Image: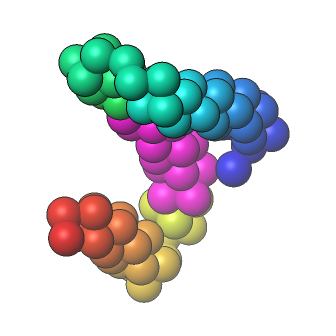
Amino acid sequence: MTSETKTTITTRLARIEGQVRGLSQMVEDGRYCLDVVAQVRAARAALAKVEQVILADHLGSCVEQAILSGDPEQQRRKVAELIEVFSRSDR
């Protein structure tokens, strides 16, 4: 992961951490259910963006290196890793 991506991800995750703490407080305070749901959806969207940034970095570095290496085994391994990660998330 590039240092720029690490900084971006760290910042986003800190913000998400604050959102989740805010969600706990909303529940404790007995806030209106749909307000809580709206904040849950916002936190999920923020996590999805983190995933997108990490995946883009991975494709632009690790997968690109495998392609440029010309090594079919390394290329297959990188594709298999992606397939595994996405199939795990569907469980």
**Quadrant location of residue 65?**
bottom right
Residue at the outermost left position = 90
Query: Above or below — where is 38 with respect to 86?
Result: above
Q: In the rendered image, which quarter is residue 5 located in?
A: top right
Provide the residue span drawn in magenta: 44-63
Expressed as whole percent of the image width and height from the top left, the position of residue 31 reads 37, 18
Q: Main secondary structure of the magenta part?
A: helix
Left or right of residue 9: residue 64? left
Task: Say left or right for 35 vs 67.
Answer: left
Picture coordinates of residue 90, whole percent (x, y): 19, 63
Task: Please determine whether, in this image, residue 52 is positioned above or below residue 41.
Answer: below
Q: Nearer the viewer, residue 79 or 25?
A: 25
How was this image coloured?
A: rainbow
Which residue: 80% across, 39% down?
3
Q: Quadrant of residue 83?
A: bottom left
Residue at 69 percent across and 50 percent down: it is 1
Q: Position of residue 9 (x, y in %)?
A: 65, 36
**Horizontally, is 8 left or right of 57 in the view?**
right
Q: Position of residue 39 (x, y in %)?
A: 38, 21
Residue drawn 41% across and 79% down?
77
Residue 48 painted magenta: yes
In the image, residue 91 sits, relative to residue 3, either above or below, namely below
The answer to whether residue 16 of the structure is visible from this angle is: no
Tell me if residue 51 is in the magenta stretch: yes
Q: Nearer the viewer, residue 49 or 59?
A: 49
Q: Is residue 74 above or below residue 3?
A: below
At 52% from the left edge and 65% from the top edge, which residue is drawn? 66
Front-most of residues 64 and 69: 64
